[in-house]
Every structure is written in structure tokens, then in C-alpha cells.
Image (cartoon, rainbow, N blue to C red):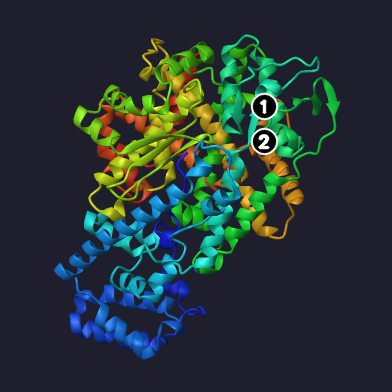
Amino acid sequence: MKPITVFLLCGWFVTAQTSLCAQLSGQSMSSVSESTIDAVIQSLTDTYGEAEKARIERGVRQVAAFWTASDGSVADFNRFCTTRFVPSGEPLDAMFNRLSENLEVLVGHLNKISLDLKKPVHLDMGEISPLDELFAGYDPSAHLTEDFFQNKIAFAVILNFPSYSLAEKTEQGASWDRRQWAHARMGDLFTSRVPADVNQAYAQALSAADTYISAYNIYMGNLVDAKGQTMFSKELRLITHWGLRDELKSQYAHKDGLVRQRTIYDVMKRIITQEIPSNVIDSDRYQWNPGTNKVYKDGKEVAFQPEPDTRYEYLIKNFKAVKALDPFYPQFADYVQRRFDAEMEISVEDVEKLFIGLLSSPQVRKVGTLISRRLGRKLEPFDIWYDGFKSRSAISEEELTKQTRSRYPTKEAFEKDLSGILLKLGFDETKAQFITSRVAVDASRGAGHAWGAEMKSEKSRLRTRVGKDGMDYKGYNIAVHEFGHNVEQTISLHDVDYYVLRGVPNTAFTEALAFCFQARDLELLGIKNEDVNRKHLKTLDNLWATYEIMGVSLVDIRVWKWMYEHPDATPAELKGQVIAIAGDVWNSYYADVFGTRDQPILAVYSHMIDYPLYLSAYPIGHLIDFQIERYIEGKNLAQEIQRMLVSGRVLPQQWMKQAVGKEISAEPLLTAADQALQAIK
């Protein structure tokens, strides 16, 4: 999982879907008349010539769209435009270079401040104090947009590097050179004017939700069955949903794992419905039977209070904080459109169409039938996480944990081995040392995440859980995934030619690179897969994982649409709708495969609570990952990854064409699944 770091900073990664001036002109924000705009455009064109007219007109109109009475008079607007416009060529190049240098200083240091202030809530450093929560919720960049408009830096950027709509980028971007793309991304910096207090409230809401989720653990050794017997080891403490899901997956390697899987599923359902007893959350003081939902103390049943819809209260708080931003992005109908059209640069309609196409495909139904045969039983809802196509499915997690704890007794041991991991993946020694010298490993309080540096002098952070006995397999598997993010973050910061083009088109791409690393976790432990059908098994595993997370993502999207239709909903009302929406998606795309209806399991993902509308990055990432894996087959993985990543943050489909020659699509995966189903009987 890659967290949102300073994504709000001046709208760094936000682009306009339609022409900014067309959308914003006429809004109450602007205090500049059309006649004044025309006069300024004509004056600048007379001075700099017709060759500059298109850039002049776009820049002046976009400045006017944001100019308010508090920014100055009409004369001040005229004076600013005529004195601050910089002609193309060496003068504009010099301005661009200086802006790039200063942006790296600002974004890099603000990112570091935010990272450091969040340490107590992100890292395993003991109890979180109320003061820790206050500092974690503080956004040091909250005032930057406001400051830059007040001191006119934002206007200088807008005037000289005007923004382009997504439609314009799609139409023209393929013919742009790298410098033109960098100028266009510079123009994306100021496409909104969000007040500092609104930004700060948003940061606080997300931080509070993240803290809530990071501390949501279940002591598995305290779960009991109807006879009061435990099923899991005493020291097993799992975060929801990631830890619970991964433990459920691991049970496919055990002959008696089914009863434990059903117990974990009962835990998940209690969380979704908020019937979970409050006194068993992150506590080992009580025993709990999640099937009957009874709590015991020293063998005697005790009364309890269920969690009071807290999960949905945090989701509502995030929704309200996001909705408060909407008026400052009038070019977008709401956050749903903004998240997809602006941040992902793929429309929500295209995403839903892509997802529904795969969810409805005959291939996933055939794979479901195959899984049922392999299990020797009918599918149950939690089999959306079937893990039997992976080579590790035949190895007990206890054995894998024994190896990982021996190899990585501390976070320092894992950090020391990062260079060795890259060497095994095909990186040369010089590049491996360069990358790993810019990555630091921390013991995470939550499930784990990667936090990228935003300036070249700083390190990316790799966070994963490291227990007192060392890194268990779950922590190792997550760590390899997060290391994939770190490698992407480092290469796309240091090797991309322009600072404003650093990174990848959207979060799905960094997830794809992380999946690419994660798929090789056993290989990195020295466990080779000699199965002649490993390629086909990997295809089926990718398809089933994509099938699962696409449904989860559809639930996420539909929940957000419902919240916009019902902005005053209570946590209890939202809970009811989340469960209903999850059931509807299940009935539409899963019930015929699993033979059961109205299951809520698609609503269990913690990302729904602390990362607004992030989930779609995963299924798109799976599709990208599959296309990349097929393209690099027989090639040097490290060389190909480095080649792809230097494209930086161009449009998603343009990046994919440059990387593998084709746009993002489910067809390669579905076609490969047909072939795999012929081979795997």
C-alpha cells in the first residue's frame, strides 16, 4: 500500500477534466471582466508576437479565473500579467528550472516534516498519546496554496505554465516532447484554491481514520469455539483486514484449516456489521466466540457493548472532509469524478466498465468451478481469497515464518539484505547499492506501507510489522511488496528527467510494480517453483485476485456515490447501505459462482475507511502487473523496470504503450486464462 503523502499540496497531482478557464470564468471567485482579459491578451500579444498568443491567452484567462478582489484591482491584474509574463526560450526555461528546484525544496521538506510528525502513530513505538494524534493530524502544507496565491507565486506559475484538460492531454500528449510534458505538469500545480482550514480539516480526518485502523487488531489466541477451545496461537495478533485476510489465505495449506477460515470469516462479518464486542478490539483480556458472538472471562460469559458504528463514523468524517473541498474544484462534479478524472486520469465510467467486463466474464466462472474441484467442496464466500494457485500454498506458513524469522530477526537485518534482494532480481551492484542507500526500514504499527521521499537528499521509508521474535512470513510478504514501491519511488525520483514528471501516472502503476516484487517473495527466499504449469497457475492466481478486488472496488465507488446522494446520513444508516451495496455487488457478480447470496464480505477492506477511493488502484494494478509480467518474460526484469519507470508521470495509457506496447486492458488476462484453463484440469 502506498500512502498519500503530500498529494494535496497545491493540487500537485490534480489536473482539469475540462478547460479551467471555461469552468471557472463566471464563478464568483473572479473579479476580472472579459474586456480587461481581452485587453491584456492583446497587449501581451503585441509585445511578444503571434507565436506566443495561444499560451498568452490560456495563461491570462486562467489567472483571471482565480483572481479575486483581495488579490488586487483591475489595474493590479493588468500590471501583474504584463510584467510577469515570461517569453518562451531561455527566459521561460530559466523560470522553469528555478521553479523545479524550489518545488523540490518545499515539497521534500514538507513531506519530511509530515513523515516525522506521524512516527508515533505509524511506527511501533508504544502507546499513542492524545498529543501524538494531534501532531499526526497536522498538515504542514495546509497553508501553502493560500500563501502562494497571496504572494502571487501561484499566479506566476498559472500565467506562464497554463493547465491543459485531460481531453487535451489525451489528444495532444502523444506528440509532446519531454519538456512540453514537464511544462504541462507544471501547469497542473494550481488548478484549485483550497483554503488552509479546509485542507487542514481534511488532513486531520484522514489521520484520525488511519490511527483508528492501525490499532484495529484481533488477538487470535483468544478466539474460542463452542467448546471453549482455542484455534490459533496465543501470540498471533492480527490487524484487520490485512492480517485476517492473510491468515485466512495461509490456512489453505492446512488440512484442518477450514474451521479456522470459517472463524476468521465470522470475525470479518462482525466487524462489517459492527456487532463485534468493543472489549475484544486490540485486547487480550477476554475470550470471544465470533460465531455465537459471546464473550468470556475466565470461562464465564460476560456482557459486552458492541462497537458503536465507529467504523462508519470515520468513513462519514472522511466524506465530509472531502466534500468540503468540492466547491474549490468547480470543474468536477464531486470527489468521485475528481479522484478518477483528475488523480487517476481514467474516468470512473471507464473504470466501472473495465471492472464489470471482467466480473461478468465466463473465465472467472470457470476458475471458480476449478477451485471448487481442487478444494473438494463447494465454494464458501471467503474463497474469494483462495490461495492455492501460488507455489507457497503447499508450504505451511509456520515453515515460511521459521525461515523469515531466522533470516530477519530485526528490521535492521531486512534493511541490510535489501541490496541482496535487488541483485537476485537482476539489478547490477551499483544500481542496487544506489537504491538501497535511499531506503530505510521501520517497524510498522499498522499492516505496513511505503512512504516515498519527495527530494533526492531524503530516503523512502519501508514500513512492515516486525515482532519481538523477528519478521514473520506475513510481515516479510508485505515488506517485499512495499520494497517494490520503494524501488519505484527511488527510480522515478532520481532517474526521471524533470522533477514535476517524477513518479508514475497514478497509484495503480506503483501497485503493479509492488505486485511484481511480491510475486517473487519465495524465489527471494531460495524456494524455486519447478511446476511446469507455474505460468498458467500464476495467470489463474492473478485473475482470481483481480476478480476479488474489483468487486471490493465497485462497492467502494458505489458507497461514495450513495454518500453524495445522502450527505446527512448517520453512521447507522451508512452501515446499512454499505452492507446492502456489498450484498448487491455480491449477488450480481459472485452469487452464481459461490452458490450463496447476500454476503457482506466485499465491505471488509480497511482501505474504505482510511484511504478515500484508493481501492480501484489495486485491480487496475493487477491488470498492469499482468501485462508487464508477460512483456518482460525472458527479459531482464531490472532493466525493463528501469526503462519503464523513466517515463515518469505521463498519461496512464501513454505510459503503458511506451512500457509494453498496449493500453491497459483485461483482455490479455482473460485470453491467458482461457489457455490456462485448458492446461490446468
Q: How crowded is the residue under tag 1: few (<14 C-alpha within 10 Å), some, or many (20+)?
A: many
Against 587, is 327 above or below?
below
Amino acid beneath label 1? Pro
Disc 2 or 1, which lies upstream in sequence?
A: 1
Against 216, is 253 above or below?
above
Relative depth, front residue between 516 and 133: 133
Disc 2 to disc 1: CB gap under 8 Å: yes
Amino acid beneath label 2? Trp
Which residue is situated farthest in the left direction here? Answer: 90
Q: Is residue 535 left or right of residue 47?
A: right
Q: Residue at x 71, y 16 (%)?
A: 230
Against 265, is 657 above or below?
below
Whole-percent x and y of residue 568? Answer: 72, 60
Q: Is residue 266 left or right of residue 411?
A: right
Q: Which residue is mark 1?
A: 381
Q: Is residue 544 left or right of residue 417?
A: right
Q: Which residue is mark 2?
A: 586
Which type of secondary structure does the marked residue at label 1 adopt?
Answer: helix
Q: Is residue 645 left or right of residue 345?
A: left
Whole-percent x and y of residue 388? Answer: 53, 17
